Image (cartoon, rainbow, N blue to C red):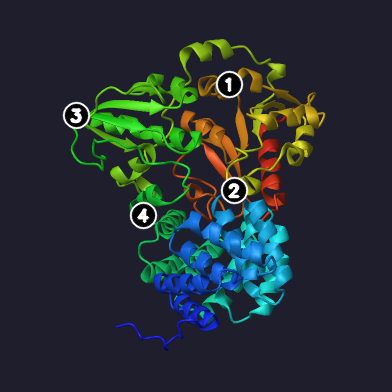
Amino acid sequence: MEKPLPPVPARDTAGLIAAASQCAAAGDQRRALCLFDHAIALAPEEARAWAGAGLALQALGRRGEAMAALCRARFLAPGLAAARTGIGGLLLDRGLAAEAEAEFAAATEAAPGWWVGWTNRGLALQHRGQAEEALAPLRHATSLAPAEPEAWHSLATALLLLDRTEEAEAALRRALSLDPRYAVAHSNLGRALRGQNRPDEARAAYRTALAIAPDQAETRWNLAVADLLAGDWASGWDGAEWRWHVPGFPARPRDFAQPLWAGEAIEGRTLLLHAEQGFGDSIMMLRYLPLVAARGARVLLELPEALLPLAAGLPASAIAAGTPLPGFDLHCPLLSLPRAFGTLPETVPPAPYLTPPATAAARWAGRLPEDGGAPRVGLAWAGRPTHRNDANRSIGLAALAPLLAMPGLRFYGLQAGPRAADIAGLGLGGQVEDLSPLLTDFGETAAALAQLDLLVSVDTSVVHLAGALGRPFRLLLPFAPDWRWMLGREDTPWYASGRLLRQARPGDWSAPLAALAADLAQLVPQPALAAE
């Protein structure tokens, strides 16, 4: 039963606004709106009533009406911080981060001692991709309100975007000391711990978050990633199915009437396997095609057009993504196949499982000069720029440049996309032959890899292709790697032909490059010892 509010004189505008604000603070937005509307009827020029009504409407999801009411409040009182903050929030919801930041800045100028304005200003800067610039207003918010957990949490989110995970952990623990049931803060603590390669502690933080808010899909997905990183694949594959419920996840669920295949008997039925996420993810999962076919299924394989040449030797009918699909009985996204087969680190279907297309292989036979038998080394130094972790996983060609002077080796650029221009931009055309104009699809890249003795790559699709072909590779990994590479090992159950070279500290490539230099030196044939 609701606790009754003190009686409000029918024509007491100030009393109505105070009572409405009390209702809003208690979460009763409908009652608050009714009282604010009453105040507006009595005093149409009262900006505080318009602002309160706008904020109540915003909380109720009536955004158009909220914007109208808040703009009326701003017109009546341009320096009313609550109105400017509410308008900023609505603009941020629309993706207008720059406009939102201007409103939040106006709020901080109008009420410099109000921590909420400074917090929102920092959040708007984060949305603008300016996490470093966001730190100052967010730190100011914590100085104004050191007992507000939201202020500390907002600071932590900016630190996480900057990969300053130890500082983020400290801010999150401060927030949680103030509010132990702050579920999102527990979840982000998991992110901070995972970024420090502390997966078991991260898993504990995610589980705490889920005990408080069990329906948080992103937390369940992040727990799955931590499980996989830690080698607990039995839990990880199940949890990974929550990816389809994460807002903004790069892959979206397919709207098929047919059911999802989860590993049950499938003999005599038609199964559609379809790509999701990146090229490397798809290449990695093509190893399961023979296992599916061995279950007696007719397999349809939908792939991006650039990957289609790789399907030539697989037991499936390949279909280009975006073209009409034939009939099928069940479907399965490629990254759900490990769950369907109950894959553990010791039961990964082995590589190689791909071969270069015959026509591409014929084109590449003899295409590269013999060069006196010098070992051929392929290079890929950058991943997809839009990848959320690309700043950490890409090393850049300049960092590899000192290795190019090693005698007895011939280097080839397999870098795709705009970063292929780094060869010319750094003046390294005499040391690295750029093959990118010839790599028109992954079939051509597979044929090129077959002509090389070693691939050196960051974590991007070409390294998966090399591993799937059984070609030797060295993978340069950041300190906090992707889940599939796990921790603390130089080998990987996914590809027997590779060696993983890991950063010892975040952002420091010196250890991987030193190990790579030693491996390249061993690749060079040593002159025969003179007979005694």
- Element at label 1: helix
Q: Gap between marks 2 and 1, in whole Å? A: 27 Å
* 2 vs 1, front mark: 2
CA distance separating discs 4 and 3: 27 Å
Q: Name the residue tied to disc 4.
A: 239
Q: Alpha carbon of mark 4 to alpha carbon of mark 2: how far?
A: 21 Å
For label 2, the residue is 389
Nearer to the camera, 10 or 531: 10
Question: Which sits in the foreground, 88 or 282?
Answer: 88
Q: Earlier in the sequence, mark 1 or mark 4?
A: 4
Q: Nearer the viewer, residue 283 or 453?
A: 283
Amino acid carrying mark 1 in the image: Ala
Q: Give residue 531's quadrant in the image.
A: top right
For mark 3, what is the residue?
A: 269
**x, y (%) of residue 241?**
35, 49
Q: Pointer 1: what residue?
A: 448
- Residue type beneath disc 4: Gly
Q: Is tag 2's residue or tag 1's residue first in the polypeptide sequence?
A: 2
